[in-house]
Amino acid sequence: MLALLAAFQLLLALGMPLGRFAWGGQHQVLPSRLRAGSVASIALYAVFATVLADRVGLIEVLPNVVSGVATWVLVGYFLLGVVMNAISRSVPERLTMAPVSAVLAIACATVALGPA
C-alpha cells in the first residue's frame, strides 16, 4: 500500500492531473509547492516502510523499542489521515484516501500489536 501511495505521489510530483485525490483536491495539476510536498511524501513513505519492515523482522536496522514506538506513531499518523481525508472538500479524496488511511492504520496497529 505504501509503495502504491509513493507511486501516486510520484505521478503528482511529475504533474499528472490527479490533484483532486490529494492535498485537499483544490488543483487538478499540483502547483510547485505541493509537488515538493509529494516528493517529501515519497521519502516519508520509505521511512514508514523501513520502520514496519524492521518491526516485523524483515530487516534489522532499528532497536526494537524504537520500531515499536515508531509503529504506534504510524498508527496515530494514519488515524489522523483518516480524519483529515474524511473532512476534505474533495469528494474523490474523501472516497479514496480516507479508506486507504484506514487500511494503513489497521495494518500498522496489527503490526504494533504483533510480536516484536
Image (tube, rainbow, N blue to C red):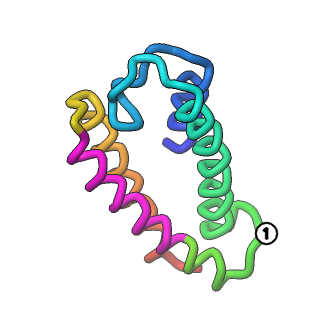
| Residue that label 1 marks | 61
x and y percent of residue 87 in the render? 21, 47
Who is closer to the viewer here, 99 or 35? 35
Relative to 53, is 38 above or below? above
x and y percent of residue 90 in the render? 24, 31
- Read off the magenta span: 71-88
Q: Is residue 81 magenta?
A: yes
**Residue 61 left/right relative to 109:** right
- Total of numbered circles in the picture? 1
Q: Residue at image x 74%, y 74%?
A: 62
x and y percent of residue 84 in the render? 30, 51
Q: Secondary structure at mark 1?
A: loop
* Residue sitting at the far right: 61
Relative to 6, is 105 above or below? below
Q: Is residue 76 magenta?
A: yes
Q: Residue at image x 52%, y 15%?
A: 16
Quarter in which the C terminus is drawn: bottom right
**Residue 20 left/right relative to 11:** left
Relative to 35, is 50 above or below? below
Q: Residue at image x 40%, y 58%?
A: 78
Three-letter code, disc 1: Val
Place residue 14 in its image quadrant. Answer: top right
Q: Residue at image x 35%, y 43%?
A: 100
* Residue sitting at the far bottom: 65
Who is closer to the viewer here, 75 or 84? 84
Place residue 68 in its image quadrant. Answer: bottom right
x and y percent of residue 72 in the render? 47, 74
Q: Main secondary structure of the magenta part?
A: helix
Q: How many residues crowd mark 1 within 10 Å: few (<14), some (14–19), many (20+)?
A: some
Place residue 60 in its image quadrant. Answer: bottom right
